[in-house]
């Protein structure tokens, strides 16, 4: 693995380009195995040495950080100013270590906080990067309303390192909510679906509305039945109490109220807890139409997977516990079901004996490949890892 100092980074990229060596951009290198297996011998180029907070402007609610800075370190620095980044830590944050900001942007995976604060792609206001030939480029700026230039931020968000190396990111920050509570509702899927639909159409603005599978609820020490986790935040405790009373009035089942500590402990379970993924386990990103999440969780194809899915977007993660092996055929059946329900399935991790494609060809595959050729004409970057292309050309 190459991990050059910041002043040496561009020269290393230029050398790789001149040698026509395939290479994989990396942040903290904690999740290099996620996604497609790379189909060529390659080098890994990490920006772990680029871990500084370059500028924090509390008054403008913006922060500029190097791509190798960990989300954990950035959140700690912002907390001292009463601010935070409204981003979920990546799955498995406990055993694998904190993910980098650059890695979060490159994968473009938003968690349950997307319900209120939108995803990481909506929070980026500036980006710095190195092209495959070592030339530096920049897009956006350091103020929230800056809209100048081509929108490279969203293009690189979710690019999985296939277009260039992210070196720094400017994001908008938010004030820390002084009051937080959680509500848990458990029961039949049909009842929870009614509550979720009402919440999504109401004037309330929860931080998150997350579906949990029955197996995930059981793993967290709760009843083994489907669960709806509702996160609430406000500046006043009385406002929170009013929201809790309002929600309780729209369900016949008693909802359990959680203090901030209890809510955070449950959210840790939704991020994979501290156990990590078993050796023969699966980690999947699932997506369906938001009004069909209950159908996904009720389907036989779901099996005994643990999973947390955002009610507002229909996007979430599912994984196997390792107690019962899951066959690739079962995952392929689940992929077909997700497609029928208006969504998709991405394989983030799978057993070594399995060879399912991480993702399928997107309808826009020709456009994706054309963009790839413009940014990486030698096809050096992340060979075999181009989102929306199941089997990229060698």
Image (spheres, rainbow, N blue to C red):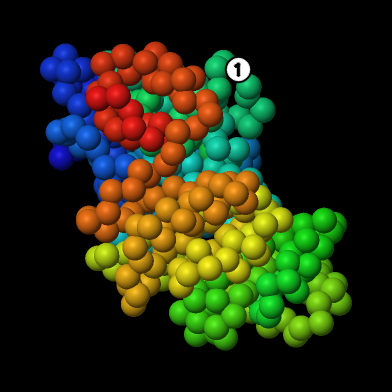
Which residue is nearer to you in this view: 243 or 227?
A: 227
Choose top left, top right, bottom left or bottom right for residue 122.
top right
Dot 1 surroundings within 10 Å: few (below 14), some, or many (20 or more)? few
In the rendered image of this protein, does residue 304 appear above or below residue 24? below
In the rendered image of this protein, does residue 180 appear above or below residue 251? above
Residue appearing at x 37%, y 51% in the figure = 348
Q: Is residue 140 left or right of residue 201?
A: left
Which residue is nearer to you in this view: 60 or 212?
A: 212
In terms of secondary structure, where does tag 1 sit?
loop
Which residue is nearer to you in this view: 358 or 257?
A: 358
Residue 369 horizontal/vertical position (percent): 41, 21
Which corner quadrant holds the C terminus? top left
Q: Is residue 379 left or right of residue 313?
A: left
Q: Is residue 89 visible?
A: no
Residue on which the image places disc 1: 148
In the rendered image of this protein, does residue 185 appear above or below residue 338? below
Residue appearing at x 50%, y 85% in the figure = 221
In the rendered image of this protein, does residue 179 appear above or below residue 26? below
Which corner quadrant holds the N terminus? top left
Q: Is residue 103 visible?
A: yes
Residue appearing at x 46%, y 30% in the figure = 156
Residue 387 horizontal/vertical position (percent): 42, 34
Residue appearing at x 28%, y 21% in the figure = 379
Residue 382 horizontal/vertical position (percent): 28, 32
Mark count: 1
Residue 167 horizontal/vertical position (percent): 36, 31
Q: Is residue 58 left or right of residue 331?
A: right
Choose top left, top right, bottom left or bottom right for residue 52.
top left
Choose top left, top right, bottom left or bottom right for residue 50.
top left
């Amino acid at each position: 693995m190459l991990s050059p100092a910041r002043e040496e980074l561009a020269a290393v990229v230029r050398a790789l380009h001149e040698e026509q060596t395939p290479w994989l951009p990396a942040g903290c290198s904690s999740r290099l195995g996620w996604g497609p297996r790379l189909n060529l011998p390659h080098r890994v180029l990490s920006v772990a040495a680029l871990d500084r907070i370059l500028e924090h402007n509390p008054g403008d609610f913006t922060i500029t950080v190097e791509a190798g800075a960990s989300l954990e370190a950035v959140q700690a620095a912002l907390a001292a100013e009463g601010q935070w980044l409204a981003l979920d830590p990546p799955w498995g944050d406990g055993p694998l270590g904190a993910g980098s900001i650059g890695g979060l942007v490159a994968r473009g995976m938003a968690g349950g906080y997307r319900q209120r604060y939108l995803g990481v792609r909506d929070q980026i206001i500036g980006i710095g990067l190195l092209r495959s030939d070592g030339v530096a480029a920049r897009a956006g700026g350091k103020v929230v309303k800056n809209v100048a230039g081509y929108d490279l931020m969203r293009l690189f968000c979710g690019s999985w390192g296939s277009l260039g190396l992210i070196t720094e990111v400017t994001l908008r920050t938010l004030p820390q909510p002084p009051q937080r509570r959680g509500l848990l509702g458990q029961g039949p899927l049909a009842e929870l679906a009614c509550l979720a639909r009402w919440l999504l159409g109401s004037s309330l603005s929860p931080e998150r509305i997350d579906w949990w599978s029955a197996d995930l609820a059981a793993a967290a020490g709760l009843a083994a039945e489907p669960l709806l986790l509702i996160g609430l935040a406000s500046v006043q405790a009385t406002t929170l109490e009013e929201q809790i009373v309002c929600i309780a009035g729209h369900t016949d089942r008693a909802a359990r109220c959680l203090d901030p500590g209890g809510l955070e402990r449950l959210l840790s379970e939704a991020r994979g807890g501290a156990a990590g993924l078993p050796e023969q386990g699966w980690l999947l990103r699932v997506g369906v139409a938001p009004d069909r999440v209950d159908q996904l969780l009720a389907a036989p194809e779901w099996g005994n997977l643990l999973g947390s899915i955002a009610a507002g977007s229909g996007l979430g993660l599912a994984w196997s516990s390792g107690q019962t092996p899951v066959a690739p055929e079962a995952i392929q059946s689940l992929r077909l079901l997700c497609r029928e329900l208006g969504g998709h399935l991405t394989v983030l991790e799978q057993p070594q004996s399995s060879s399912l494609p991480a993702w399928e060809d997107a309808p826009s595959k020709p456009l994706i490949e054309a963009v790839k050729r413009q940014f990486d004409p030698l096809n050096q970057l992340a060979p075999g890892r181009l989102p929306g292309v199941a089997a990229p050309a060698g």
